[in-house]
Amino acid sequence: MRLRSLGVALAATAALITLPITQLPAAAAASADANLSQGRVATSSSNENAGTPASAAVDGNTATRWSSAFTDDQWLQVDLGATASISQVVINWEAAYGKDYKIQSSSDGSTWTDLRSVTGGDGGTDTLDVSGQGRYVRLLGVHRATQWGYSAWEFQVFGTTGGGSGPIQGGGDLGPNVIVVDPSTPNLQQKFDQVFAQQESAQFGSGRYQFLLKPGTYNGINAQLGFYTSISGLGLNPDDTQINGDVTVDAGWFNGNATQNFWRSAENLAIRPSNGTDRWAVAQAAPFRRMHIQGGLNLAPNGYGWASGGYIADSRIDGTVGPYSQQQWYTRDSSVGGWTNGVWNMTFTGVQGAPATNFDSGPYTTLDTTPVSREKPFLYLDGSTYKVFVPAKRTNARGVSWPANAGTSLPLDRFYLVKPGATAATINQALAQGLNLLFTPGVYHLDQTIDVRRADTVVLGLGLATIVPDNGVDAMHVADVDGVRLAGFLIDAGRANSDTLLRIGEPGASADHSANPTTMQDVFVRIGGAGPGLATNSVVVNSDDVVIDHTWLWRADHGDGVGWDTNRADYGLKVNGDDVLATGLFVEHFNKYDVLWSGERGRTIFFQNEKAYDAPNAAAISHDGIVGYAAYKVADTVTQHEAWGLGSYCNYTSDPSIVQHHGFQVPVRSGIKMHDLLVISLGGKGQYAHVVNDTGAPTSGTDTVPSKVTQFP
């Protein structure tokens, strides 16, 4: 932050006093046309510092500002999202203003037309009538009035866009598959039972359901959750919604085997289990968030059959957690009364009561805190009004975030409620208007890519809402902007090959988002299983500082449309951005690398992987003189990377003679640090020769005994 003279500081203070926070200047309000720039993607030639980004000039808040470097020329540009007829531009200058500047428009962001030239400007608020068209509007500063740069509280562009259908309205009802109940709802147990009967074994069905429980006390209920069923409390805190009963996941539908209990969730509830212990026997893609269990928690199915999970975050379990048959688990920013055992890989960060690390002889990897975390946005009731709470970022967190609840609340009318039948064009129009997205439960086929370009946009799904890209389009692109929140939905690859199902940041993105990172939470990807699906890349992260908090990227090994080429998908996760953090990373069965990490200073805490079952032979996965693509590869160019608690399993059912060279491949440099790695042969169907690079004992036999490396190099 620059140091100012007393006079400049007083002028800035006066501006703060005279311009009410979050209200538009009076001159701007006089325009009959719409403010087309608010909430849009803004870029600039430079920023004075990370606290004065371009986006601050189009956020509608006159307490935040953009400011440039202290040189001429400088520019501030806004993308209106569509070609517009531009009638007026309003600049609310800070004390460092432009003396001579131009207002310009462009159709492509590269060739510019002058709309207005100003000479001898005197700061304050400039209201400029203009006439022109363009998608992009730019303030080009030619001469500064002060020794500082250019600084604007707000840059507003007024005009009209074509289309004639009028603006899309936010808010409204939550759609047909959201079941809102309170303690007096008649036949409540019957409602839970009816949905469970339909969804218990509907692994690849089209049903999607969300139960929302209003605050209060619910006695004697057992909410059993099947596929694509979510249950959430509508209080601001978990204890606002008390269940004296159970929320249960078991595996009776699969003969006591819980390894396929995918795609369901429980959030924001307090549960006092009827027999003292709640059962949550899940596999991947089944988050357990913001839960208060007033007793114990059993993570295994009845009979203690096989189980392959799972994820807990921001939860308090007063009693003991019993994983029993669970092969792996990740728990973050929580507290537990105890933890009884583990099979292969149990990882904890920021968990009060977690067991100590013992990976050399046991399954535990424990870090005292989580470096960066921000809890998932959630729907709640403020009185009788729905809002979405967006939790704040935490650093070095330990324990739950509630009841302090740092963050912001967004009213529902700032969301486009996406319902079955909505088109991609309408979704993108809503985003272009500055609305957030709330996907209600359903399956959504898209004929164009969802384009998220505004900083701080929230894209939230209920009931495992599912996005299916058709005709080979990508499902979703996110611009290289601050603070986008992606949460709670499933992307299901279409029959025509998509290049990238989810892309965060454009190629070459380099902006600093450390103060306000984009987060991807409970966003799942599936290729095949519900029918043939194809995608070269599942998720590509180009932006810096992204936090990936619990994802399962799955090329299907069972279901419909499954085969080495039928549901081909080469890469699960590609990370090109720097300073990306993954907490709870599940990636399985891709044809080439499951994870390929090329960005600097990346960190992963907990990784679970299975190699592709259906590799036809060793030749099909041989490259660069070795057999098998690593489950997790750090690119040869990377100089700094660190990871904890990583496991890769092979189950080469098509050719059990395959010997995979290693599970992990990393450059050997002082800045590369890998902690607590293991590889496992499942039942002897294929083996690993090494754990990481050429280090680590080979697996052998059929006893599923891990081969471990506790530190590399």
Image (tube, rainbow, N blue to C red):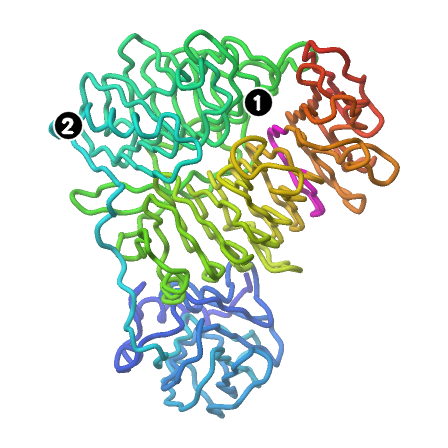
Viewer-proximal residue, 386 or 394? 386
Rendered position, 57 above or below 182? below
Residue 531: which disc?
none
Question: Farthest residue toward the right?
Answer: 625
- Note whether 708 is above or below 565 in the view shown: above
Could you tell me which quadrant the N terminus lies in?
bottom right
Residue 319 placement: quadrant: top left
What stretch of residues is rendered in magenta?
A: 594-609
Q: Which badge, 2 or 1, is on the more N-terminal residue?
A: 2
Task: Tell me which amino acid carries mark 2.
Answer: Pro
Is disc 2 placed on a helix, strand or loop?
loop
Residue at 23 percent across and 17 percent down: it is 244
Residue 605 lies within the magenta run? yes
Whether residue 440 is visible to the viewer of this picture, yes or no, is yes
Which quadrant is the C terminus positioned in? Answer: top right
Q: Disc 1 on helix, strand or loop?
A: strand
- Residue 631 lies within the magenta run: no
Residue assigned mark 2: 183
Residue 385, given in percent of the width and then of the height, sits at: 19, 47
The x and y percentages for residue 451 are 48, 61
Residue at the location (34% across, 33% down)?
230
| The image quarter in which residue 584 lies | top right
Bin the neighbour count of mark 1 within 10 Å (Cα to Cα): few under 14, some 14-19, many 20 and up.
many
Q: CA distance from mark 2 to mark 1?
A: 37 Å
Q: Is residue 452 visible?
A: no
The picture places residue 113, in percent across and down from the top left corner, at 53, 89
Q: Main secondary structure of the magenta part?
A: strand
Q: Which residue is the site of mark 1?
A: 347
